[in-house]
Structures are given as structure tokens and as C-alpha cells.
Image (tube, rainbow, N blue to C red):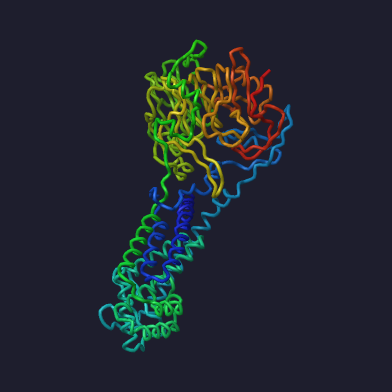
Amino acid sequence: MLEQVFLKVINMSRAAGIVIVIVIFARFLLKKFPKYISYMLWSVVLFKLLCPVVLESKISPVPNLAPAFQADMLEKDAVTLPENFSTPNINSETEDPSQWEQPEPVEARPRETVQAKTNFWQLFILYGKYLWIAGVGALFLYCVFSVISIHKRVSTAVHWKENIYIADGEISPFVMGSIRPKIYLPEGLNEKERKYIILHERLHIRRLDHIVKPIAFLALSIHWFNPLVWIAFILFCKDMEMSCDEAVIQKLGETVKADYSASLLALTSQRRILYVIPVDFGEGNTKERVRNLAAFRKRKKGILAVIILLAAFLVICLAFTRKTTVPEKNTPEENPFIELTEDRETANETDEVSESDISLDIAEYYTTKTGNPSQLYYIDDNHILWGSGRNEYGQLGQGTQDFEFHDQRVKIAENVLHVDYSQTGFAIYLTADHKLYGVGNAGCGALQQYENWDWTRYVNGSQYTVTTPVLLMENVVYACCGRDDIVCLGEDGTVWTWGTVYAQGSFLSQNVYFIPYPQKILENAVMVTGGWFNHAALLRDGTVWTWGYNSAGNCGVADIAVVDQPTMTAEGAVMVWTNLAVDGYPQPEVDTIALAWTGKQQYNVPDNIGEFDENYPRFLNNTVIRKADGSYWVCGENVGTEEKVIHGAEGDYAVICTHEFTLCD
């Protein structure tokens, strides 16, 4: 919980920092105008610092920043591996600590593993949250002790009239108290000084400055680590006092400027109380206040009205964040995730199927048993779906969430044909009436729980769960899970996807693609596949289209960056796989991997979760296709001759890989 709050505060502070810079610039442009206009601008800074809700608008100049540390938090549960430990790109959730000290296995091909060092930003988050809360606590204690000290010093103050008290000692006049504010004056003031000060402090009370300033100090305490917030607080206090000075002069007339300024200079030498809590008459840069009074002139009402309207408009704009455009559902031509070629568009329009088009019996590819030592799902002969294992996301579909390990199976649903699960804690299943259901971790958006991508949900999935299966889509004949998204095949051959398709980057530079609802991305498909790394679709004409993470060239694309739209990478195929896994943790033999590519070796899923016996899957970072002549072609890890350093779930490591499809002998 503390980590979630800490990360939320960091991102609020980043957004507020942009607003502070804009307000400071606007304040500079307004230096010749009354200070109450500048003072008004600080209200939006206070709003951004304290409001956790992000309001969106297309007119806002404030960019929609990707969450800080987002990509680093993707792997926040990863462990630090010994230098001599070489591991493939596997699911970090299934790592077995007992394996860490094993000697490096012998491999047929040379491979140098780069030590997976603990991410600096993970350490920052781990320890930074305690440093942050310590800073908040220190400022809170400072505030409490200061208030106690002030009350002690004015405890002997004598009531003069109304809410005005005369205090002993050398103090600067101030207002204190939220519900019943009191004005405290030092002894020895002459009649003019007393008149000016009382009017000044009453103006503060009328404007509720005695309430606003403690709230501003609260914001400062929460965001104490941000130097821009300290600058904003200082300038806010100056504008508050100077605007009140101007109000006094405007009320009493410009003839009192000299006497009022003299009072300011005289009282500034008095002993100070506390800079951050009471509304202090002597607060701020006195010389700057005096110069401001000397330069203060009444402005034409028409000009002031225009400036005030512009300032109010700026406040409204800054209160919002620039709206992120989300692609409309079912409109692939407007979706940046896919750009269909002219040939593909023509084929889709005519929807003609030639004799050479391929077809598959999709039922042959239904999965009736899937899992790992942490999770097991299987469908029995009566089409009942059972589950066992972990339930921290409610992924066992019982309407409850707990952190126990369930050895005994529990019934999830009936009339089920196909099941798949994501290593991040959600499962999907297809029923006989072609309806797709989902249950478990809703943080990534694959279970359609929120409109816009939300990093707090993404990294804290155990707080955003679907514990009872929900309907995701109808008219589905096949579906599979990615890491954080879902891809499915419709009855009409359309391909749909949604969820967090990809999220990568670090610190202030993140790249996220999120689809909140099923989005059509291809047509005329006969098969879809997916898994931890990337997705693929096989179309009727035998072309293979891939998208997703491509760090090892596993999408069949030369550029190792994320493939952010379905891209045709092969022709003449009759089947495609991207979600293959084999036994042999931590590193299976190369021959075993090659057998998996040809379908002759598969990951062995036991009938009971208690039978896994440390049998961890190795998820293969490849795309494999089968052609009509029965040959198998593969790209990605353990293919080709070139060694590259790639980024996997457990860190950076060197591996032989290529984006070119290579014949598997």
C-alpha cells in the first residue's frame, strides 16, 4: 500500500512540476499587473499536488506523462541471480530459488550470460518510499511542535476586541486558527500601524488565506522531495502577501503607501513566529513588497477583465491533462496498431476464398490442460473446468481472493472447450456456445475493467481483481493469453485483441500501448497464437502476421524494437506457433528445443499440481511455422549464428538469435 501511494505521489509531483513551471512563466508575464491574479494561478498548482484523480481534456497544455518507473515495476518481483547462473527468458513467477546455486548447465552452443543486477530504480522504490514517509513525518512533527510553541508564547495574550489579541514580546503580527481565526498583534503599535495591520489581516481571513496556507504546507510536506514545490510555496506566500498589501492600498488610497511601507519595514525586524503555518504580516521579502507597492497602479477595468479571463482559462486548462486518444472499437483503419496493405484491404472487401486458401479444424488445437508449478487448469471429459494453485488474484474463480496455495482442485465452470492462462495471473476459457470468459488479475486491463491505462493498477494487480468469471466476448472460436493482453479468433475469421499490448521503457521514458476493449486488427484468419513474448495470426492465404516484443527477432522482423502493428513476415504457411514451452529448467538441451519446434516435444503438464515436482517450463522465445510440404521454419532465440544481448524477464543476457526464418532440420 505504501509503495502504491509513493508511486502515485511521484507521478502527481511530476505533473504538478510542469504546471509550476508554466505558472512561474505566467507570473513573470503578469509582474506589472495586480498580484491577486498571480495568486489565483497558484490554486491550480495546489489542485494538481493534492488531487489524485487525473482529469483529461484536449485543450490542456499538460502532457499525459507515462508513469515513472513503469517498466522497472514490470519486473519488480525479479530476483538477483548469481554470476554463474545462466537462464533462458522464462517466467519470473515460476523461478525456483533452490535452483540458484546449481552449476551452469552445459550447452551445445556458446552463451555468455550477463549478470542480472538489481535494477537501480527498484532499489529506489524499495527504500525511497520509507525515506519519503520519513520526510513527511519530519515536516509533520515540525508543524506540530511549532504550533505548540506558538500557542505557548501567546498563551498570555490579552484580548483587546473582537478576535484581536495583544501579545507580549517581539512578534510579527499574524493570524492563526482555521475555524475561529484570531489576530495577534505585538505591543507598542501606533494607531496607524494597528489600522493597517488589522485591515491586512482581516483581508486574509476574508479570503480564507488562514485555511489555504496550511493546506499549501500539507502539499509541500507530501511533495517535499520536489524542489519546484518549494519554489512554488515561497512564491505563493509572496503573492499572497503582496496581493493583500495591494488590497489595503486600494481600500485606503495611494496616499498611505509611504506609511504602510514604513510599517512593513518596522515590523519585519520583529521576532518571527513560524514561516509556514500562520498568516504572518511580516512574511516574505519586505524590500520586494515595498517595491511592489511603489510600482502599484490602478489598471483600466477593461484590460483587467481580459487578463483575469485569460488567467482563469489558463487555470482551467492546467487543471486537466491532455487527453490520450483511444482508438474507436471495430475501426481498424483508424487504429495505429494496424495498417492493412492495399492487397489485404481488397481481399477483406471481397472476402473471396480461393481453392488454395487453407483451413483448419480449430477444435484440434483447443487446450484442455495448461499450467506450471504455480497454477493448473484442466478440462475433464465432461467439459468441466477445474483449477488449483495460487489465488492471489482470485484466478480460481470462486468469488474470493486469498494468498493460500490450493492443492485441491476447485470447479470453475461447465461446458468449457478451451482454456489458457497468463503468467501474470489471469485465465480465459471458451464455452461451447462460443463465449469467452476471464477471471483473475485485472490490473493490465485484459479483463476490461477500466478505460485508460493505469500504472497503479498495472503494478498492483492483487488490488484489482476479478474473482468471478466475467464475459469478455461472444462469437469466439479460439483465444489465447499474452503476458498482459488477449488475442482471439472470431467465428467470421476476424482477429481481435485488447489489454496492455506492450509496455516498455524506464524512469521518465515509457512506451505503452493499451486497448481497453476488443479491437479488430485482422480478417480472414484461421488461427491466432500468443504467449509471453509475441503474437501471430495465420490467414487463409497462408501468410503469417506477427506483432509484440521482438527483442530476439522472434517476430521475424529485423528491427528488435516492439512490433507495434501486425506485420506480414512469412508466406506459404499452414500453421504457426509462438507459445511453445518445454521441460528442462533452467536450460533444456538444444535438441529438446528443436524437437519442440517440430511439435515432437511438448511441455509435460501433470494431472495434479502436486505432481509437478519442480518441473518448471521454459517458454521459447520463437515464432515457428509449418509449411505445406511439412517443413518447419523458426526465428528468434537459439537460431542462426549471431550472438546478441537482449532484454528478458530476468535481466539482460547474451543469446544466439536471428529474425530470419531458418529451416529446422
Nearest to the observer: residue 652 or residue 383: 652
The reply to whether residue 592 is in sight is no
Q: Against 299, is 196 above or below? A: below
Residue under the point 42% across and 58% down: 49
Percent of width and height locating residue 39: 38, 67
User: In the rendered view, does 371 fall on the left or right side of 432?
Assistant: right
User: In the rendered view, does 651 fall on the left or right side of 206?
Assistant: right
Nearest to the observer: residue 150 or residue 486: 486
Quarter where residue 441 is shown: top left
Percent of width and height locating residue 269: 45, 84
Quarter of the figure that contains the C terminus = top right
Q: Against 263, is 420 above or below? A: above
Quarter where residue 105 is shown: top right
Percent of width and height locating residue 503: 52, 40
User: In the rendered view, does 518 fall on the left or right side of 79?
Assistant: left
Q: Against 273, is 375 above or below? A: above
Quarter where residue 650 is shown: top right
Residue under the point 61% across and 13% down: 630
Percent of width and height locating residue 569: 58, 25
The reply to whether residue 492 is in sight is yes
Residue placed furthest toward the left: 162
How many dots with numbers? Answer: 0
